Amino acid sequence: MANDVLDTLRKDINEIDAELLVLLAKRRRISHSVVEYKISNNKPIRDEQRELILLEKLIAYGKSLGLDSYYVNNVFQTIIEDSVLHQQAMLQQSLNPDALNETNRVAYLGGQGSYSQLACHKYFSRRAGKLVELGCDSFSKITHMVETGQADYGLLPIENTCSGSINEVYDLLQHAQVSIVGELTQSVEHCLIAQPGVELNEITKVFGHPQPFAQCSQFIQTLGEMQLAYCDSTSSAIQEALKTKNSAAIASAQAGKNAGLEVIKSAVANQPDNHSRFIVVARKAMQVSKQIPTKTTLIMATAQIAGALADALMIFKQQKINLVKLESRPVPGNPWEEVFYVDLEANLAQNNVKRALEELKEVTEYVRILGCYPSESMKAVQVINNDSLVEE
Ligand SMILES: O=C(O)C(=O)C[C@]1(C(=O)O)C=C[C@@H](O)C=C1
């Protein structure tokens, strides 16, 4: 194909992509008007029935245009997720006008290129206010910045699909004077990156944060005698890899590119589907509308007697509250004593949740609410079972 033919075809694609963006922006504006209606009429943000009808219609129409069901389904699931999360953010801001800042000063781990920075951009891009980034070198610095008013929000990774819960963050939450006001999930695609042109066999030292090292442990083992150097963030690992030709870092491809580094090997995490869940903390708790799916996280200590934890958990069953995560951590200074962190699908404004908390006080030694916040782990509507999405 002559170059001019390719150029013409690419020009056509560019024009279509630009038109798609114009339409997506128009759709988002309409979605913003829908939320205003939902706020005035006290309607739930999510309408799964409407999503189902929409997706079924779009899949059928897509088929008539020669587009396969998986493709149409994936594209529109993404569009609808964006719409729902934008509506949730708008509703929350209308309910908590005190929290509306002209600038959002956000403390997170690392600097340019850290996964926390990507998560920070993702979360605050949906919210009003100019983002002021405050990169920190430790998790405790992040909560300290929020506690002392130097930051409005802090962003902390709390769990990862490969390496599990991030204990340091759980332990910090035991005493930090902050409240969880939000959560988000960020996909984490680890790569081995180094200076341009450098081959894997030339690398003698790999820099990384302990979490990425844990998430890529199987790949790291294949590197044999390689020297590993722990850094306080992925951004510091990148800075180290920039210093010498024989060094590499574990980071995202984008972060590497921004720093002028190249990917030597991509997809080095133990599981291909690697996601981190982050929490957003602030000094003051926020009210969460009953119109959006909500999570409540609490910390509790039970007596050291048989059945004490079971008694506490029974309360959630009796009050029909879904428990989505239970985590235990030791109490510093009290060997073999544990505190439990509980994530509930619950809103503190619901009566059954209020009753459960009252009853919980009776059967535990200590309970503290760490936060009540909109759930952003959005479950996609299942159009039809996956088999029927396969083309005949
Ligand atoms: O139709 C609505 O109620 C909308 O808010 C729009 C929309 C969408 O973006 O298509 C978003 C959220 C609902 O769950 C369903 C559909």
Image (cartoon, helix red, strand yellow):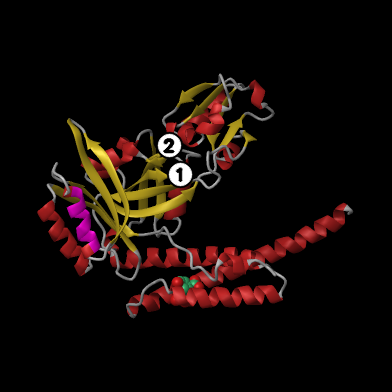
Relative height, residue 116 to residue 343 (above, below): above
Q: Residue at x 62, y 73 (%)?
A: 59
Expressed as whole percent of the image width and height from the top left, the position of residue 353 reads 21, 64
Q: Main secondary structure of the magenta part?
A: helix
Expressed as whole percent of the image width and height from the top left, the position of residue 115 reads 47, 42
**Amino acid found under the numbered disc labelled 1:** Gln
Position of the N terminus by quadrant = bottom right
The question of residue 311 being in magenta is answered with yes
Q: Residue at x 26, y 66 (%)?
A: 320
How many labels, in total? Answer: 2
Q: Is residue 21 left or right of residue 324?
A: right
**Amino acid found under the numbered disc labelled 2:** Gly
Disc nearer the start of the sequence (2/1): 2
Q: Distance between the residues labelled 2 and 1?
A: 7 Å
| Secondary structure beneath label 1 | helix
Expressed as whole percent of the image width and height from the top left, the position of residue 103 reads 37, 53
The reply to whether dot 2 and dot 1 touch (C-beta < 8 Å) is: yes
**For the residue carrying disc 2, how many other residues have a C-alpha within 10 Å: few (<14), some (14-19), or many (20+)?**
many
Q: Is residue 285 left or right of residue 238?
A: left
Examine the rendering and report whether any part of residue 142 can be seen: no
The residue tagged 2 is: 110
Position of the C terminus by quadrant = bottom right
Q: Does the residue labelled 2 lie within 8 Å of ligand 1?
A: no
Magenta range is 309-317
Q: Is residue 235 left or right of residue 248?
A: left
Examine the rendering and report whether any part of residue 331 can be seen: yes
